[in-house]
Amino acid sequence: MRSRKKARTRIAIQDAALDLFAQQGYEATSVDQIAQRADVSPSTFFRYFGTKADIILNDQDSQLSQLCAAVRGQPSEIRDLEAVRLALQAAWVPNVDPVRTIRTGRAVGQSPFLCGVAYNIGRRWMDAVADALFERRGDPEAREECLLIARTALGVFGGATEQWAFSEAKEDFNTLVDQGFEMLERMCH
Amino acid sequence: MRSRKKARTRIAIQDAALDLFAQQGYEATSVDQIAQRADVSPSTFFRYFGTKADIILNDQDSQLSQLCAAVRGQPSEIRDLEAVRLALQAAWVPNVDPVRTIRTGRAVGQSPFLCGVAYNIGRRWMDAVADALFERRGDPEAREECLLIARTALGVFGGATEQWAFSEAKEDFNTLVDQGFEMLERMCH
DNA sequence: CTCCATTTGACAGTTGACTAACATATGTCA
DNA sequence: TGACATATGTTAGTCAACTGTCAAATGGAG
């Protein structure tokens, strides 16, 4: 089948690119280099990814909507912050690929541009989660508060992810998330 | 005096650039265009700003160290979160230029790259504030907690800044910051 | 095997960020 | 005024992302 090969090529390019990014940085890596390592011609690269940046802007959209569904699905007795935490631990944590997360993290950490891409992705998440909270609660006054909760919860989560990637996935992801949220509670007395 | 003119040229370039960024986006604006609007040659542009991105990476370093000093200067009875809030309100809020903040925000919002630059700046702030907290408290165990507090406090602050810029500086900045921190407390019960 | 479609590569060209070299203007000081 | 340093403009050139075109290879259908 033809589509099989296409998928393989796509992944090969992506892997080659992420390796190089992690190793020498995003801006220091040229498309030619990526193409060479992936054993394709530069023009083929541009047929698969219209832009060098498109390699990163991966399609996590389906996972995001899963997460939002999980937020909306939390019972209404649970307060918002807990709802987000539970949703994250139910719908996100189990699907994380350690190798890809670590490598992507390394690549992103080295490039302002990739940080920007990551920031934008995080921002989209924040908005989506805030919407989910907003809908779950129904109070039309609370939009700004939902944003704040989403921002804070995803911030804690991001910190835990960083710690986890830093430890090369040796520590338990869920435990780190729990610890983060505990700290948050303590911080507010 | 010579330095007077240099400063004026620098500001002219910066203003021209930010206007164009806000109007047509960062990536759609070429250095030549900026130089033309600022009435200088492209090479002069590069003498003032080594990179197109340097226009944004403004010298907020002195303000950042002021902020950190303010954090360190808070009396030790006050808990960390409050200390950051008070420091922000004392050492940052009074120095904000509404026009520049609004325009920069508009420019940044339109470009993934500028978001990245902004994110990196925010990250540097977070680290610096966490250091200040860490030093103020002296507990060598609490590094991760300081980071979390800094991230959360600056997140609240960033949200307030956004709201403020969105309102075209009509609302009172300090009040918005207070509201944000109140919401944070409420969120944790 | 043959026809056909799709994938791929080779190549030439555009654009824009950035650098280096040299010449010119402009303000400073003796 | 004259000598000097510094700021600026001009020009040419590099490098890499990206586009478009055409020809060769590949793989499935008759």
Image: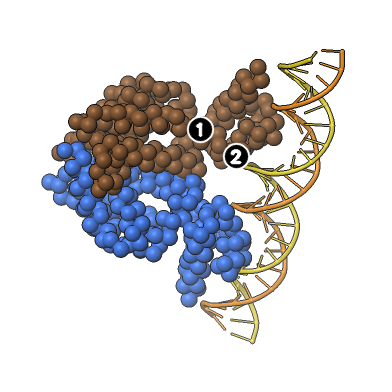
Chain colours: A brown, B blue, C orange, D yellow
Q: Which residue is mark 1?
A: A58
| Mark before the other along the chain sequence, 2 or 1 | 2
Residue B16 coordinates in the image, percent (x, y): 52, 64
- Type of amino acid at the residue the image marks with label 2: Thr
Labelled disc at residue A72: none
Q: Nearer the viewer, residue D8 or A26?
A: A26
| Marks 2 and 1 share the same chain | yes
Q: Give the letter of the chain under mark 2.
A: A
- The residue lying at 61 percent from left, 38 percent from top is A50
State how far apart marks 2 and 1 are (Cα).
Answer: 12 Å
- The residue lying at 18 percent from left, 42 percent from top is B186
Q: Which quadrant holds the C terminus of chain A?
A: top left
- The residue lying at 61 percent from left, 60 percent from top is B32
Residue B135 in the figure: left or right of residue A33: left
- Asked if labels 1 and 2 touch by Cβ distance under 8 angstroms, the answer is no
Q: Which residue is mark 2?
A: A51
Q: Which quadrant holds the N terminus of chain A?
A: top right
Residue C2 coordinates in the image, percent (x, y): 87, 17
Residue B108 in the figure: left or right of residue A135: right
Residue C17 coordinates in the image, percent (x, y): 59, 52
Residue C30 vertical placement versus A29 (above, below): below
- The residue lying at 19 percent from left, 51 percent from top is B74
| Label 2 crowd bin: few (<14), some (14–19), many (20+), radius 10 Å | few
- As drawn, which residue projects farthest toward the left? B77
The answer to whether residue A183 is visible is: no
Residue A159 in the figure: left or right of residue B141: right
The answer to whether residue A34 is visible is: yes
Residue C20 coordinates in the image, percent (x, y): 66, 54
- Type of amino acid at the residue the image marks with label 1: Asn
Q: Nearer the viewer, residue B16 or B125?
A: B16
